[in-house]
Structures are given as structure tokens and as C-alpha cells.
Amino acid sequence: MSETINTAAQFPSFEKPTVQFNEKGWGPCELPDTFKDVPYQPFSKNDRLGKICDWTNTSNNDKKYQNKYASSFGTGNQYSYYHEEDETTFHLVDTARVQKPPHQRGRFRNMRNSRSGRGRNARGGLNTHGMTTLSGKNVKARDPRHGRGMGKKFGHRGPPPKMRESSVAVRADWASIEEMDFPRLIKLSLPNIKEGVDIVTCGTLEYYDKTYDRINVKNEKPLQKIDRIVHTVTTTDDPVIRRLSKTVGNVFATDAILATIMCSTRSNYSWDIVIEKVGDKIFMDKRDHTEFDLLTVNESSVEPPTDDDSSCNSPRNLAIEATFINHNFSQQVLKTGDQEPKYKFEESNPFISEDEDIQVASVGYRYKKWELGSDIVLVARCEHDGVLQTPSGDSQFMTIKALNEWDSKLANGVEWRQKLDTQRGAVLANELRNNACKLAKWTVQAVLAGSDQLKLGYVSRINPRDHSRHVILGTQQFKPHEFATQINLSMDNAWGILRCIIDLVMKQKDGKYLIMKDPNKPIIRLYDIPDNTFDSDDSDDGEGDDEGFQQVYNYAHNKI
């Protein structure tokens, strides 16, 4: 007898589910009825998971990261809680202030007062601009530029330092001989260097016009354009130095080159000087088509000019402007004219021939020598810009330079038109801080030349946005040695730096060398370079650098 087995009773039935195929994406094609009308908040896997409830209420104190738990898709209000019932059903916790013991009363009172004062101005009213008015001391404490206060507390170090370019590209075939850092150079000293002795004097000087001493802010005078040639001849191109090198001295340079080396520890921008050693003689030169003779502007400032070549306030454009102001000012303050008396040295200007009919700037050249010890005799060409006749009839030689104001707001300086007549010391102190290297070079040049006075002029733009028109706002004069003491310039240290470099080169073999200030570090490097370096006229190191000397500053010849 056969038995029939019912498989349906032993095993449960299986129904094949319906699988939806979404051709346009992933997930179900249609939303089930159970999930309809349910709000959905988009989220990202990068979102932080916050807290459901925080009774400590410490999250409100984290002012820096207020939105760290916010969704990257934006804040949604689908899950926001709105209380619509009667608020009388809520019972607040007792908020009565606890009486502190006497020894704790008054603590943090100043802190609470300072916090409660935020957002209000000095008169107690609300500050609509959202900026707190503080006293001068507190402004410095909270200003990130001063390195203290809020900036340093939260790690705000400001923008990264700008990387400057070197004055000349270092080539692969240059050998680095020595690196001299500024901390070591500052400690050098060569005392008891006597005043230089005149060997040859050349040129013609004009007398200073004392009416410019009466100029002030209310009685300003426009800066004029003086069409005169200013020679900036390097050492080996000087015919007098070539003549003297056969009989006198073994180290030859100009006052501008010596001042650059002596004041190197105050420089921030890159510069370079070519040195040729021939036997036991050293010739210090500047490269052709270089910006060596341009005057820097705000080189030692905390916020130097920005490197924007299209702007008139770029470092190079400001240097060109300052150089033209200096040339024109030094000639305008002199008594010009054929009938005016002139001071003539023994020889005529060595850079012009007798048959040339050109108008040359008033300048007097002194070729002097110094004994530096160890049989080192320095011969250098120094310059005077003018001569002043004293009431007793004596003649005093002058070095005339000009400081220029371009934009006091961008330079974080003081307004010359407001402070120059009443607080001239503050204006000069600001210039000493922003142009320490330039003023030190001028002082060294005046000391080397033996000038009796250093005349400084204050020249400003008529309009901060117009770099082609300027006015003279005032003048000031100093004795070079006294001014060197005032700006903390040690001539013993200056001579020590120069002697250190001379000794390094003297130990080398005959050839060509180059000293260069590192553009971003307080270091001077000495390179051994091939003899044919910088000799070709088509060198790309300084090609086109003299384009900036075009006559773009059209000063008016007549008074405004």
C-alpha cells in the first residue's frame, strides 16, 4: 500500500519577491506608502556627529567653531522644535545669585566689565560698525601686527613672508667661497682709522641757496625738473683711478660701493658688487645696466611696498621716483646761473671733455686714501653736492639728499603735512625706521667725503596717486659725525666689515669675484666667478634695466 507524502505540510511556501530595477539610479523606483510625507534631511558622511542634549551648555563658548556640527548641505529646519503649548507649564530652575564670601567678591570684575563693553564705543552708545573703540595701549595689545593679543593667542601669524629675487642669478659655474652672516659682521670693529687724505680734487660746485631753509608746510615750493647730466661712473671706468692705481693704493672703489658694503648689515634687499683681483690690487665695481644706483624706499619697513610692477608704488617704481627726486632736489637748492659764483677744484670734471657743450650737475670729486693697516691702502672717489658760505666767509662742503613721501597710509607712516612743522623729530624717527639702510649710506658717504653738513630735504607728492608731481615741504641739516651717532652708526664697525671682505679677497688667487646679499636671509656670500662673466653686452642679467631712467617726471619749471 503506497502512501502519499504531502510536501506542502512539511516545508513553508516561498513566494518570489518582486525586485525593482532602477535604470536612472539606485534605490526603489517608487516611494512606499509608509514613508510618504516624512521629512528628510540630507546629510554627508563628512558631517560630525553632535550631541542629542548638552546640559553643560559649553558648546556656546566655542566661538571659533560655531558651525562644526552643521551639515555641509546647509542648515535645515525640518527637525526644528517649536513649542506651541502654554509656556506656563514650564518651571524654571532657581536662578537666584549665590552670595559669594567676602574674599571672593570683586574677582574678575574687570574682565566682566571689559566683556560687557564690547560692541560699544567710547561714549557708551552702540557701535553700529561692529568695531570696538579702544585706547592706544589696548589697540597695540589686540593688534595682530604687534605679535601679541588675539593674533598670537589663536595662532594668527599673518601672511607668509615674501620671497624676494636676487639682484643677479647665481649660475652653475660659480663657486661659493664664504658666507658671512650679519650677527658676525655686526661684532667686527676696526678702530683708529684716520681721516682720508686728499690726492686729487676735481669738478665745480655751486653755492647753496639759503632761502630753501625757510620753506615749511604752509610755504611749500614745487620741485622742478633740472636738465643736467649726473655721472655714475664705476671704479675701473674712472680715468683718475686708472691713473692713480699705477702709483698709489692697492684697493680701489667709489663712495657708493664702500657705503653699500659698510652698511650691509642694515640692508634687506639684494645687491651685488664685482671684485677683480690683479696681483696685490683689488678693484671693486658695479655691474653694467644694474639698479645699484637706485635709492630704495621703505626697505627696512615692517610692511615694505608690494611687488606689483603695474603699480606706481612697487619697489622698483618707487626707487626710480626717489632717485629722480634726489637728483632734482640736490640741484634745485643751489644758486644756478652764469653770474652766480662757483667753487672750482684744482682739476676739471674728469668725465667730460673740453669740446663737449653739455650741462653737468654741480658735483665735486675728492680722490682720497686711507691706511687700513697691514699695508692695505684704500683709494676711493668721494663726492660733494654743494658748498655753503658761512657769515665769516669760509666755505663748508655739503652732501645734499632728499627723503620722499609717497603715501603715508600705505606706508603706515605719519602725515608730513600735519607733523613736519610741529613734530619734525617724529617724522625723522619714522624715516629712520623705514629707511635705515638708505640714511646710513648717505651718512657714510658724507663722512668719507669729509662734508661739513648733511642737508636733508623733505619732498612729498602733491597727490598720493600722482607720482609725477612733487613739492618741497622743508629742509634739515646735520653734521655727519653727530648724525652717525644719533642713528647708532659705528664707523669702527663699518671699517671692520670692509676690512673683513678685503682680507678674504686678498687670500684668493687672481681672478674675478662677486659679493652678493642674499635676498631673503641676513647673509653675504662671496663667489668665485669666471673672468668673462658680465663682459658680454647682450647679457640677460641686467638687460633693459635702464629703461626706468626715462624722463617720466615732468616737473614744472615755473611756480604753481
Image (cartoon, grey):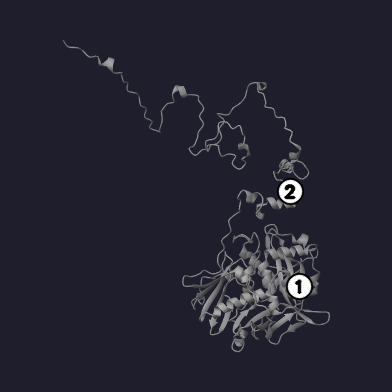
- In the figure, 178 relative to 19: above or below? below
Q: Residues within 10 Å of mark 1 (few under 14, many from 20)?
A: some
Name, please, the residue furthest toward the right: 391
Distance from the alpha carbon under mark 2 to that under mark 1: 39 Å
Q: Residues within 10 Å of mark 2 (few under 14, many from 20)?
A: some
- Residue 80: give x, y in percent of width and height: 58, 29
- In the figure, 142 relative to 289: above or below? above
* Residue in the picture at 73% in, 84% down: 344
Q: Taking the image as drawn, is residue 227 in sight?
A: no
Q: Amino acid at mark 2?
A: Leu
- Residue 392: give x, y in percent of width and height: 83, 81
Residue 320's image quarter?
A: bottom right
Question: Which residue matches tag 1?
Answer: 478
Q: Taking the image as drawn, is residue 396 in sight?
A: yes
- In the figure, 445 relative to 97: above or below? below
Q: Is residue 120 left or right of residue 51?
A: right
Residue toward you, 380 or 24: 380
- Whether residues under marks 2 and 1 lie with C-beta atoms below 8 angstroms apart, the answer is no
Disc number at residue 134?
2
Q: Which corner quadrant holds the N terminus?
A: top left
- In the figure, 159 relative to 368: above or below? above
SS label for mark 2: loop
